Image (cartoon, coloured by chain):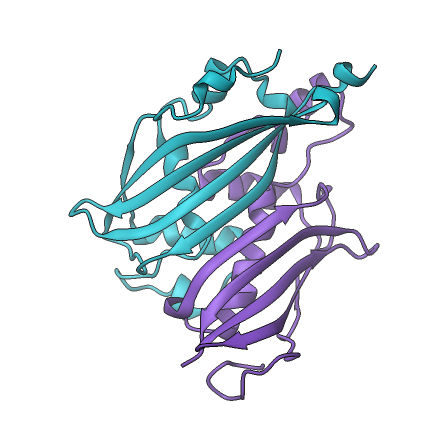
Amino acid sequence: MPVDPGVVGTELPAVTMTVDAGRLRFFAKAIGETSEVYAGPGDVLPVPPSFLFGLELEAPDSFRWLADLGVDLRRVLHGEQSFVYHSLAHSGDTLVARPRITDVYTKKGGALEFIVKQTEVTRADGSAVAELTSTVVVRHPEAVR
Amino acid sequence: MTNILSGEVRVGVELTPLELPPISRTTLALFAGASGDHNPIHIDLDVARSAGLDDVFAHGMLSMAYLGRLLTNWVPQERIRSYRVRFAAITPVHGRPTCTGRVVSVEDGLATLELAVTLADGTVTLAGEATVTVS
């Protein structure tokens, strides 16, 4: 079922997360990062370049926005991801992610559907951290049969 | 290791490749927890099979995090201005990614790097670009 293009412009619920150093050390472990800068014992570690993608996933039901669009999560692929950085965040920062749907389009006669989501990340005081753009691809193999 | 602070940044400079060990199911489980991406397609074989797949596959963002390591090995993170990738192919369990990067332009104090993640069989799984300040 194709996604209604009328959803473009929809703002999704904002997500707030205070980043803790232990979580960043866990992330470092998961990606094999052993540098003291990212995996060291201190209280203040930098938030690594792609970690911000996970902020929105801290919501209790983080994939609900896709289900609400009628998308089967099992058919979803991550197509593209971009980050534009304004300032480096660190553990201890309270970050706010504000996502919105900015585009919906299809390719290959409807076999592939693309949903573009942009997310502004700021600190709680409003200072800019980054802008994220995610392109989600939904496979509709039946559309080409 | 070629570090941005120890050498000239010019077009054609290649970053020291980052070779990863084969991706295990343990890695996928840890990355799901650490990144917050709990999509079961990456960690639950039953869900993958219900979607018609033979097996789970790695999170694209795991490879993007590996590429991020390539960048931060080379440059202090404060200097990274932008970072983007296109996910070109799925990374299977046991896939062995290698991250590479090359400076393709230096202009107005900003270097642009072309980035890739490639599996041992030559499959390019991620293709991307980053810009970093160099002065």
Q: Is residue B35 above or below residue A90?
A: above
Which chain did the image draw in purple?
B
Give residue B12's position: percent from left, percent from top: 66, 79
Residue A18 visible in the picture: yes
| Quadrant placement of the C terminus of chain B | bottom left
Q: Is residue B131 above or below residue A82?
A: below
Give residue B67's position: percent from left, percent from top: 58, 59
Give residue B98's position: percent from left, percent from top: 69, 61
Give residue B61's position: percent from left, percent from top: 55, 45
Left or right: residue B44 compared with residue A19: right
Q: Is residue B127 above or below residue B73?
A: above
Q: Which residue is nearer to you in this view: A3 or A27?
A: A3
Left or right: residue B15 compared with residue A28: right
Q: Which residue is nearer to you in this view: B127 or B65?
A: B127
- As drawn, which residue projects farthest toward the left? A125
Which chain did the image draw in cyan?
A
Residue at position x 31%, y 54% in the image: A21
Residue at position x 58%, y 60% in the image: B129
Residue at position x 49%, y 65% in the image: B131
Residue A48 is drawn in which quadrant? bottom left
Left or right: residue B18 compared with residue A129: right
Q: Is residue A80 above or below residue A1?
A: below
Residue B44 visible in the picture: no
Residue at position x 80%, y 57% in the image: B120
| Quadrant placement of the N terminus of chain B | bottom right
